[in-house]
Every structure is written in C-alpha cells, then in structure tokens.
Amino acid sequence: MAKPNAAFMKPLTPSSDLAVVVGSKPLPRTEVVKKLWAYIKKHKLQDAKNRRNINADAALKKVFGGKGTVNMFEMTKLVSKHLK
C-alpha cells in the first residue's frame, strides 16, 4: 500500500472567496474537496443531466473564476488556485 502523500495532507489556507464555501481555517486538500462536495449537494448544484458538471452559485462563481458551469476535474484545478 502506498503511504499517504504528506503534501496532499498538508493543511492549506483557503482564499477569502473559497472560505465562504469551506470555512477559513487551514485544511488538507482532501477535506477542502469533501466540504466543497457537501456544499454542492446541500445547494443542489450538481447538474441533473450531466452529473460531472457543477452549476456554480454566486459563491462558487468567485472560486471558479467567474464560470457558471465547470466539470469535476476543472473544479479541482480551479480550487487549487485558492489554496496556499
């Protein structure tokens, strides 16, 4: 079994835009993604026809660089820009 990648588990600080969605305390990337999905499900932002697409609300639009719809893979990339 591969041991967990330490860089992957390192707590990262969300930008102010991302903090609106996941909170402002530093979190490992895995937790950020988990919280993001919880938010997406709670607000029913997953596209009904294409489940891989996320329809952004006002808060997520800021995180997604102004895009209204992104797919899961794009989302992960865009969210990375909001973590340091």
Image: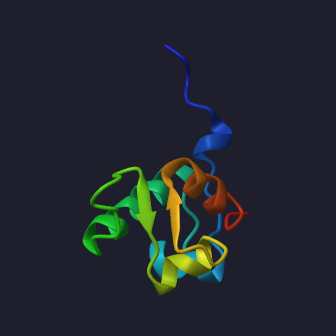
Which residue is at the front of the view, 37 or 12?
37
In-image side of 12 versus 21 (left or right): right
In-image side of 70 versus 15 (left or right): left
Q: In the rendered image, which quarter is residue 12 located in?
A: bottom right
Is residue 42 placed above or below 31 in the rendered structure?
Answer: below
Q: Residue at x 55, y 22 (%)?
A: 3
Q: In the rendered image, which quarter is residue 55 located in?
A: bottom left
Single out the residue that lies furthest toward the top: 1
Which residue is at the front of the view, 30 or 75?
75
Q: In the rendered image, which quarter is residue 11 located in?
A: bottom right
Q: How many marks?
A: 0
Where residue 22 appears, x then y in whole percent?
A: 47, 72
In-image side of 4 versus 21 (left or right): right
Q: Residue at x 44, y 81 (%)?
A: 57
Is residue 12 placed above or below 2 in the rendered structure?
Answer: below
Which residue is at the front of the view, 27 or 75?
75
Is residue 55 placed above or below 20 in the rendered structure?
Answer: above
Applied colour scheme:
rainbow
Do we see residue 28 in this rendering? Answer: no
Where residue 69 appears, x then y in whole percent?
A: 50, 67
Q: Residue at x 72, y 63 (%)?
A: 81
